[in-house]
Amino acid sequence: MTELKPAVGTSPAVVPWTAVSVVMVGMFMAILDAYIVVVAGPAIRADLGATEGQLQWILAGYQLSYAVLMITGGRIADMYGRKRIFLLGAAVFTLSSIVCAAAPDPGTLIAARVVQGLGAALLVPQVFAMIAVLVPERGRHQVFGVLGVVIGMASIGGQLIGGLLISADLFGAQWRAVFWVNVPIGVAMILLAAKLVPESRVAGARRLDVPGVLALSTALFLLTFPLIQGREAGWPWWTWACFAASAAAFALFAAIERRVADAGGDPLVDLALFAQRSFTVGIVLVLCVYALLTSYYLALSISLQEGLGMSALGAGLMYAPGAATFFVLGMVASRVVPKYGRRVLELGSILMVVGYLCTVVVLLSSSGFPVALVIATIVLQCAGGGLLITPLLNTVLSGVGPAAVGTASGALSTAQQIGGALGVAVIGAVFFAAFQPGADTGVAVAGHAFLMSSIANFAVAIVISVLVRQLPAVRAK
């Protein structure tokens, strides 16, 4: 197998866009499937007769296996080849999507979603790693900028795409179309990646750190499982016991990794990564950003559909202005970050703070849910998100060496999933505590509940704006 060294560019940088675009499709699909099912939830529940708990696991099973196995997926690819593991992950993702689409009952759908998350965990870390080895350094900021737009569009546009697919009812598939759509795209991606993407791996990678894999997987499971299940269960004692056990498992993992490194072995995670300020601050930023995004769009979807009585398509269309704004500002960010550096991220974080504040003000001044005004404030939030999220990836990974890029990208993707689960647990709890239909109209209830979640997100946005200023004040190369 050819062992590619990281691309080192001279001016002008030549970016292999054909290969990069193919692997970015994999990232888009993996992120999209974490969001597209939210808007399909009511239709799935009605068709399969799923209970509330089963519906939650249809949504959460994917997220759980995705988060737990992400870092391991990056490490395996470092050893056995990034292209090989990317193709394996794409195949698992595509085949499990077929099972999801054909599922006759909730249990089958839940099991298939867990396997689909495994496919995503094998696929996603390779996207970051392949960019690092295929793209010259001088062009990397542009490519990571485009990748940030891809991730943001998949996150923000997932419910729009889901609404369109369900409304179109292609071949009578109804909600199943949100899974069937993965199949032709997945097959095309596998064929193109096999032909166009070169192989690479880390030279000298020897064997998998199995004790480290077991300890980290246990720690991540004990952290994410109660985050996903705790709110619905009412935060019983076992959720807090899981959190405590997770902390102990993380400590055990750190001890194992130090012992492996001291013995001259290959640790699953090089703990020296966390000595880099850009990486550690960036990981926390990613946690906060995705805690904010996932919970907020879940709250908006429920407010529009269950509070205001909109259809899946109608609710999905409400995301279109924000998605378009994110796309435009994300592309702008990828071009101006090389000149202005961290100031672009700072501006984005400020716009997000102002956007959430405007949402709070609009809802406080109304007794209902003024859709047009709320969507206008969300457009402002998305403008900030485009300027912040798009260059954040390059900022976090800029100081990571090629030998650690697979592990670092896996950690980054894991942080996205944990952040999403954390946001749904904490900010979602705020929303659902206020979303209690009773004597008031659904519109009034939706307005009050979305106001509460907007206040919580405003507070998180302030934390994000402070963290951005802790990033190294360097410009992209």
Image (cartoon, rainbow, N blue to C red):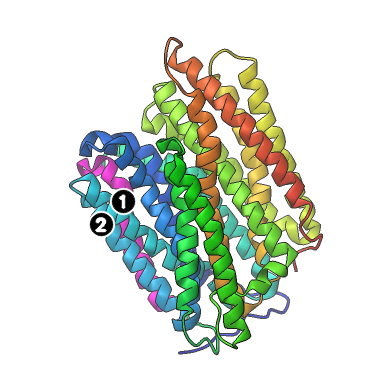
Residue closest to the far top: 439
Please say whether residue 86 is one of the residues in the magenta stretch.
no
Q: What's the residue at 27%, 52% (across, down)? A: 100
Task: Where is residue 97? Give x, y as percent.
Answer: 30, 56
Q: Which residues are magenta?
A: 170-196
**Callout 1 amino acid:** Phe
* Crowd class of label 1 (few under 14; some 14 to 19; many from 20; radius 10 Å): many
Name which quarter of the figure residue 138 lies in: bottom right
Residue 81 location (% of width, % of height): 46, 81
- Residue at screen point 45% across, 57% down: 221
Residue occupied by mark 1: 179
Report if residue 83 is visible in the image: yes
Q: Residue 121, relative to residue 290: is it above or below?
A: below
Is label 1 in contact with label 2 (beta carbons under 8 Å)?
Answer: yes
Locate residue 205 relative to residue 342 in the image: left or right: left
Location of residue 137 (image quadrant): bottom right
Label number found at residue 93: none
